[in-house]
Amino acid sequence: GVEGPTDDPDIQALRAKQKRNLMATLLLSQGVPMMYAGDAIGHTQMGNNNAYCQDNETSWLNWNLQPEDREFLAFVQRMINLRRMHPVFRRRRFFQGRPIKGADVKDVLWLNPGGNEMTEEEWRNSSVHSLGMFLSGRVLDETDERGQTLSDRDFLVLLNPHHEDVAFTLPEFHPASRWMAWMDTSREDGLRPAGTHDSGTAYPLQARSMVVLMERRGNG
């Protein structure tokens, strides 16, 4: 609710979290991410959306990074590395939203906070403020540069743009499966919280934040 420079620590913290949210959303989207020069270090044009002819601080990049800019840069680098290491985030083909042959889940599944697949009614319900996206890495229908079939871990992306926290139930697709939080934008550095979470239990999804969880089965 505030624009322009401010010394309010709460506003600054929210802005930093929203930067992490936006960058994580971009880098976890299918297709080719498009970033503007300076995005990874928090460069701002102060609201000017047409600064091509501004030969001044509006368009210059300041490489004397402040601690918060270095922290954000490190977060962006980790998100790029996650995308590079896991082909489930950079598919060449569109999702089908259909059951995978030989598996009991779909290639993509949209979940409500109860951990169940969203219904058509929930998609149209304006009071629904958070959702989860399950990405199956078991059968990607993709090949690498050698023609070998690719496979990956199963991932869960939870999003909560609402101003209130949500207890998000983690889906239970396989017996004794657990979820490890890889990234949580509610944390100042975006790093994952320690420990794992059992399927069927609730993850404390904070207000205006998103989380990436990776499924672990057995000792894997």
Image (cartoon, grey):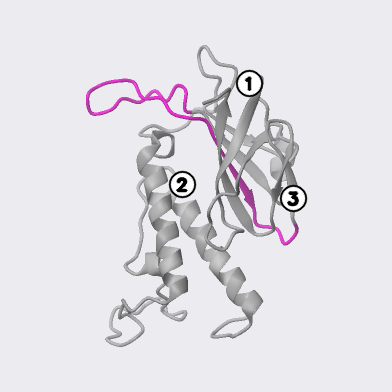
Residue 24 is situated, as x and y percent measured from the top left of the image, at 48, 53
Residue 138 is situated, as x and y percent measured from the top left of the image, at 47, 23
Residue at image location 74% in from the left, 55% down from the top = 165
The CA distance from mark 2 to mark 3 is 22 Å
Circle 3 SS class? strand
Query: Residue farthest to the left?
Result: 146
Dot 2: few (<14), some (14–19), or many (≥20) neighbours within 10 Å? some
Q: Disc 2, disc 3: CB below 8 Å?
A: no
In this figure, which residue is indicated by the disc labeled 1? 174
Residue 56 vertical placement versus 214 (above, below): below
Residue 17 falls inside the magenta stretch: no
Of residue 146 and residue 55, the one placed in the foreground of this image is 146
In this figure, which residue is indicated by the disc labeled 2? 28
Amino acid identity at mark 1:
His
In this figure, which residue is indicated by the disc labeled 3? 166
Of residue 215 and residue 2, the one placed in the foreground of this image is 215
**Camera-nearest label, 3 or 1:** 1
Amino acid identity at mark 3:
Val
Dot 1: few (<14), some (14–19), or many (≥20) neighbours within 10 Å? few
Q: Quadrant of residue 215?
A: top right
Q: Quadrant of residue 121?
A: top right
Magenta residues, start to end? 137-164
| Label 2 or label 1, whichever comes before in sequence order | 2
Residue 186 vertical placement versus 47 (above, below): above
The CA distance from mark 2 to mark 1 is 24 Å
Residue 115 is situated, as x and y percent measured from the top left of the image, at 71, 34
Residue 209 is situated, as x and y percent measured from the top left of the image, at 62, 56
| Label 3 or label 1, whichever comes before in sequence order | 3
Residue 159 vertical placement versus 37 (above, below): above
